[in-house]
Structures are given as C-alpha cells and as structure tokens.
Image: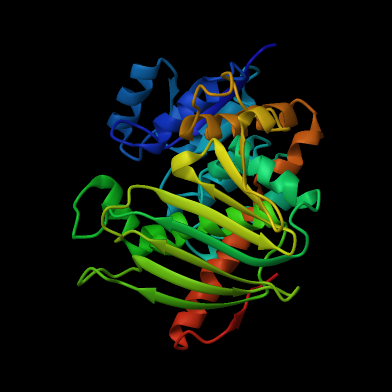
C-alpha cells in the first residue's frame, strides 16, 4: 500500500517531540515524510530538512499553499510546535484540505482553540490529537472492560501524572517554553494534566460536570503552575481527582489511573504499562496482559515489551486507516472534541483557583 505523504511543522534540530512523531509515523510503513517547515529559523529549517532528505519551507503558510497545489503534495501534516503555535498552522493546513495530526494540548488559549475548531468546520480535512497514552493496548482494554459493564456503576476515578524534572529553576529549551505562560498557556495543568483528564474520560466514557482546583507555583518566581490538584464531580454522582505535578522529586513519568465501580476496580500504571489489574468485588485480583488485549494494538509478541513510541505509532496507524476511509478506527483516536474538552478543563481549573478552589462547572 502506498504510504501517505506526510509533512511536519516544527520538530527541527534540538526538538524532542518531532523525532518521536517521525519514528511513530514510519513504524508501520503507513506514512512517508516528504516536506516540512521544521523551524521558525529558516537556516535551521533548511539544515534540518536536508538532514532528513525532505522538501524545506521557510514558513508553514507557504508550505500549506505550495503542498496543496502539488500533484505529489502532502496529504497530512504533523504539528509539533509549542502550544501557542498549534492554531495558526493547523488552521492553514485544514483550510488547504490537508489532514492535521497535532500534538497536545489543543492550544494555549481559548481563542486559539476556537480558531482550530472553526477551520475544522469549514472543510473536509480531519483533525487528530496525539494523546498517545490512550492508544496503549491495556488502556484500550480498560476502556473495553468499562464498556462491557465489568466494573458496574463507576463510583470513583483517580488519575495522577507526576514528574520531578521541573522541581527547580531548570534551564533548557524544553523547560523554557513550558514555563512561559505566553507559549504554554498553562504549566503542569496543560502539559501533563490534560493527559490525565483525557485518559480518565477515554477509559470511563464520562466527563466531570464540576471541578475544584488548587494550582500552585512551587518554584519561587515561576509565573505558571507546576502543581495542580483537582477534585472532580460527575453528573452520575461519581467522584474523582486529578493530581498533576512537575515538582514531585523522584518521579520520572508517574502516570496512573484507578477506576472503582460497584462490581470491580481497574488499576493501570505507565511504569508497568503492559499490565492491567482487574479487582472483582468478590474475588481475587487478576493481572491482565497484552495477551488479553482485544484491540490487538501491539506489534511484538506478548511478553516482549512495547511502550511510549508504540502508543504514538498506534495513533498514526489508526489515522492512516481513517484517511484511507476506514471510519471504524475513529472511536479510539483523540480529535477536536478531546482537545476542546482539555481546554475546558484548563479554563475551569484556572477559574476555580482564582476563587479559592470554588466548585466550577466545566463547559460542555
């Protein structure tokens, strides 16, 4: 099958997430990277493109117009820029009829999110958001178990995402833009809190109706949150919580999700991502592995570990199927609705924190 022609905005020399997307996109042979506007610095953009052997553009607007006009132009583009630079390129490519695969969160501000939503509504190009953890095999199996009714009525939901890499005044390219309110929009809340929010919603099929948030900047002088503690209320009567922190010393990438129902409970942790613990109310706990994964979202035999890159690759594989016309994959691929939900979560948390953690309704 001919690979889908892919472009990229951002992800040039020195960038982290661009390389992750490039590996994931080519892992199953479904995409071929052929063009890019890889940096806002034209010299760096050209040097990065030359190293990858692809067509280079000095800016994304020029790239969108030129690629849309080519018979062999790109069919999809990956946006791997800092948060504040998601909206403009996404809108440009969507309006050019080119599918967009965008890194999370959706944008830095509600206005930027609205710009993307408007561009999606104007045309036929699709928009996808890379919440990669929701594409891991045992997370998809957890979702299937909830849908099957294995947990009964859900009562409690607890998601955590703990890191320690910003526990002091760290200076690096990644730290600089993530701690800049203008470029990031939100700190730990947006960078990793939106992952926890989307993961909980993906598995449970429920979105909280109200939240109460306590946001902190633990590092002196930091102008953005680095620790977020959020209480959740669901319309069903269920309760929950999200704790997202980048100042939890000793934590590398501590993402976890626990869901408790009337019949059973689920426990999934990224550090043991290929195992899912199902604890029935009246029986011993069961450790499920990829051998029980009904989505078959894996490439190596069970017992041969997969992880972070493969989660991204699962999204790219599903996106390729959708672009080719197989809509059955759409239910498990994050998109605009997930992005808008994440933005509503950030906005509600900020509003609550300004009101001394008052309960705030989350916009639908």
Q: Position of residue 201 (x, y in %)?
A: 65, 57
Q: Is residue 97 above or below residue 143?
A: above
Asked whether, in this view, residue 170 is left or right of residue 83, the answer is left
**Which residue occupies the foreground of this view, 189 or 223?**
189
Asked whether, in this view, residue 177 is left or right of residue 257, the answer is left
The residue positioned 80% from the left and 53% from the top of the image is 149
Q: Position of residue 143 (x, y in %)?
A: 70, 47
Asked whether, in this view, residue 116 is left or right of residue 56, the answer is right
Asked whether, in this view, residue 13 is left or right of residue 234, the answer is left
The number of numbered badges drawn on the structure is 0
Work out which quarter of the rendered image holds the C terminus and state it.
bottom right
Colouring mode (rainbow / by chain / secondary structure / one colour): rainbow
Work out which quarter of the rendered image holds the N terminus and state it.
top right
Q: Is residue 95 visible?
A: no
Identify the residue at the far top of this view.
1
Q: Position of residue 214 (x, y in %)?
A: 43, 78
**Which residue occupies the foreground of this view, 190 or 118?**
190
Q: Is residue 185 above or below residue 266?
A: below
**Which residue occupies the foreground of this view, 320 or 141?**
141
Q: Is residue 85 above or below residue 314?
A: below
The residue positioned 70% from the left and 58% from the top of the image is 281
Q: Position of residue 10 (x, y in %)?
A: 41, 37
The residue positioned 59% from the left and 46% from the top of the image is 277
Q: Is residue 290 visible?
A: yes
Q: Quadrant of residue 163?
A: bottom left
């Amino acid at each position: 099958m001919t690979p889908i022609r892919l472009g990229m905005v951002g992800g040039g020399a020195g960038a982290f997430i661009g390389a992750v997307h490039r590996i994931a996109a080519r892992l199953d042979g479904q995409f071929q990277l052929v063009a890019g506007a890889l940096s806002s610095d034209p010299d760096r953009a050209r040097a990065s493109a030359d190293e990858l052997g692809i067509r280079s553009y000095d800016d994304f607007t020029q790239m969108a117009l030129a690629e849309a006009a080519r018979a062999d132009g790109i069919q999809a583009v990956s946006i791997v820029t800092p948060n504040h630079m998601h909206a403009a390129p996404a809108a440009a490519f969507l309006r050019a009829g080119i599918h967009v695969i965008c890194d999370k969160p959706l944008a830095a501000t509600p206005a930027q999110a609205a710009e993307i939503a408007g561009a999606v509504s104007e045309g036929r190009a699709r928009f996808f958001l890379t919440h990669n953890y929701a594409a891991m095999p045992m997370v998809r199996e957890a979702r299937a178990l909830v849908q099957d009714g294995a947990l009964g009525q859900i009562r409690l939901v607890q998601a955590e995402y703990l890191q320690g890499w910003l526990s002091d005044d760290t200076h690096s390219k990644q730290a600089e833009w993530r701690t800049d309110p203008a470029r990031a929009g939100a700190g730990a809340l947006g960078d990793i809190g939106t992952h926890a929010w989307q993961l909980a919603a993906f598995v449970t099929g429920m979105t909280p109706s109200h939240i109460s948030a306590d946001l902190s900047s633990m590092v002196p002088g930091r102008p953005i949150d680095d620790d977020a503690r959020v209480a959740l209320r669901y319309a069903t009567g269920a309760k929950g919580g999200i704790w997202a922190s980048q100042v939890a010393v000793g934590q590398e990438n501590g993402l976890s999700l626990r869901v408790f129902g009337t019949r059973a409970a689920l426990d999934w942790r990224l550090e043991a991502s290929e195992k899912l613990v199902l604890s029935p109310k009246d029986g011993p706990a069961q450790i499920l592995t990829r051998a029980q994964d009904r989505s078959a979202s894996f490439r190596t035999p069970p017992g041969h570990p997969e992880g972070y890159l493969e989660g991204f690759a699962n999204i790219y594989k599903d996106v390729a199927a959708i672009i080719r016309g197989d809509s059955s994959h759409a239910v498990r691929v994050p998109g605009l609705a997930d992005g808008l939900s994440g933005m509503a979560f950030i906005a509600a948390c900020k509003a609550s924190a300004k009101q001394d953690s008052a309960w705030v309704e989350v916009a639908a």
